[in-house]
Image (cartoon, coloured by chain):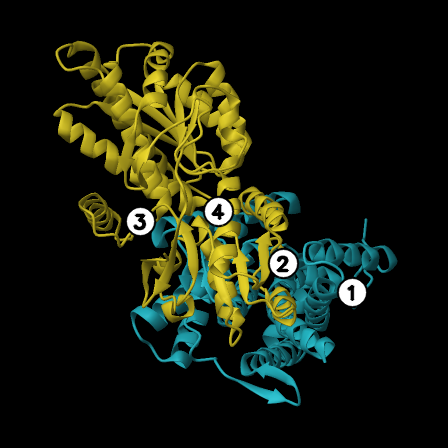
Amino acid sequence: MKKLLLVLLSVLCVFSLVACSGGGETADDGGSDTAAATPIVVGGSGPLTGPAALYGEAVKRGAEIAVAEINEKEGTEYFKLDFQDDAHDPEQARNAFYKLLDDGMQVSLLCVTSAPCAEVAPLTQEENIVAITPSGSRDDIATYGENIFQMCFKDSNQGIASADYINTKFPGAKVAVIYQSSVDYSKGIYQTFADRAAELGMNVVETQAFTDEKDYSVQLKKVQDAGAEVVFLPIYYDEASLILTQAGDYKPVWFGVDGMDGILGVENFDTSLAEGVYLLTPFAADATDDLTVSFVNKYNELYAEVPMQFAADAYDAVYVLYNACKEAKVTGDMSASDIADAIRPVITSMTFSGLTGSGVTWAASGEVSKSPMAVVIQNGVYVSAD
Amino acid sequence: MDFILYLINGLSLGSVYAIIALGYTMVYGIAKMLNFAHGDVIMVGAYTAYFLLVSYGVNFYLSILITMLVCALLGIIVERLAYKPLRSASSLSVLITAIGVSYLLQNSAQLFWGTSSKMFPTSFTNGSFSFSDVNIPYLTILTIIVCIIITVVLQWFVNNTKTGSAMRACAEDKGAALLMGINVNNTISITFAIGSALAAVASILLCSAYPSISPTLGSMPGIKAFTAAVFGGIGSIPGAFIGGLLLGIIEILSKAYISTQLSDAVVFSILILVLLIKPTGILGKKTIEKV
């Protein structure tokens, strides 16, 4: 046993030596090679471990694809992605942020999930670094300063858009809501939905919440007993897939938001259960435009998965930074603060078209002008609902 | 009529908790350690069964058997590598190690199998029958029956076989058992193997009822089952059975009649009450700590 340990330790030592020397070399390259521009370091953090790892991974992969494309197009290393794990924990996100600062982050993708975003946004603002979060959708995130931008639409937009949409599409229908009260995202959307529904005089017959669980029999029974014809599910697709499975013979119109996106990608999921499900999404992986097709193919080739909207948002966010940096003609040897001052006005005046929308603009407050689009699942694919 | 439906849902959830709790209580009763990685063994079992059924198209019953073997093997490996070197260490070190193993398994699963969830095939256990107005899934009945069989067999095994007596001897006093010629290490390994094989059965029943599988699927049921084991009196096999069923029923009923959000709070409040009134749990034996 002791011998084995010794061998293991020595192997580890050798590895660390190799790693060190490797690190040294790349640093030398950057320093001595003045002809090629130093890359601009794009920092960011997200959950790469833990229960929310799915989202962090999608963002990291989407961003990696965008960075690789940009570097190929530029013929040199224009962007360098530095993506840290924050395990969807504000405390760890803060530590990741300081690590990124040490690593020389010049522009930022902030964080993937809302709570870490809200923790890191004030710090990013203070350091004068421009940040655009691909997926931190809580309403307050963009309010932390002029440097903070959102790529996805705010939670309240989704709540309002859902209420408006249900009200026009199913006038007078009995509506029920099942939401996850332990998740900011779900709760935020539910609240704005409820306010808007009251304003519109919608017939909301039942509201059920859950925390972290797998058994939804009680919530489903209550919703069914209330006779709901439309059930609004402002939750992530993982929970939604279980709810759809457990609903059995009860088949109301299910209405999800962007968190529902991905439900068709769940491995071995019986897609007939999702037939007729409505959802709001900025990105449909089966759209046929060139940009989407090329992105989906690349993603599928590299990771053997169909990308979800988190990946698409990250891809777009990197391109927003790229377009801004190009237009402001910033270079990698500038300080983060100088870059921020140069690209901030560019972002607020630019019109961006990408995977998740075209003609997208940003207000000075950092909010994005994207309107959620409703799709309905028919024969296992998204079809525009209008 | 609603009440009966809730009761049946509670029984179904509770019997899954009970099977997981049996694994906890086995290991605790004999090795005197809390194996917090138990929930993650369930997760490994779920993935094993998933790949056998979906990717390799193995027969359902054969899959159960292979999954049990894989989990039993995993249990033995974990015990040998992580817990055995700590046999004489304080119970706190073992507890921390168990939490470490739990994270190791979870993160390895994320690495190997990805973070996105998969749907467990339910076609094998589908179907239900109607009893007057209430719809009862076959799976619920199956889960309850399996749970009862396991409880009875385990109880018989521990009390009436040679290995069982060796287990009880180890539980009483490891040192003395060793002096009596009992191979303590092997006995503890067998305990882990049985506990983990139970986790495999639990994983298949759990995933048939709630078919979304992800690397963290074991953590919440694991904690609930641990609670159930404490509730029933940790170390006691019938206690784990009763604790699991009660926990499931209380959880569903408090969701139905109190609040869907506060159900966990209600469950754990009842646990605290039980422990205040009867600190050893419902069926727990009072042991006098020798100083």
Instruction: Output the chain of dot 1.
Output: B
Q: Residue at x 47, y 53 (%)?
A: A165
Q: Disc 4 to disc 1, how far (Cα)?
A: 55 Å
According to the image, label 3 marks what residue?
A307
Q: Nearer the viewer, mark 4 or mark 1?
A: 4
Q: Amino acid at mark 1?
A: Gly
Q: A86 and A152: which one is in front?
A: A152
Can you name the residue that lies furthest to the bottom here?
B132
According to the image, label 2 marks what residue?
A204
- On the rendered structure, is B209 left or right of B91? left
Secondary-structure class at tag 4: helix
Q: Disc 2 to disc 3, how far (Cα)?
A: 34 Å
N-term-proximal mark, 2 vs 3: 2
For residue A161, the mark is 4
Secondary-structure class at tag 2: strand
Q: Amino acid at mark 4?
A: Ala
Colour of chain B in the image: cyan
The mark total stands at 4
Badge 2 density bin: few <14, some 14–19, many ≥20, Cα 10 Å: many
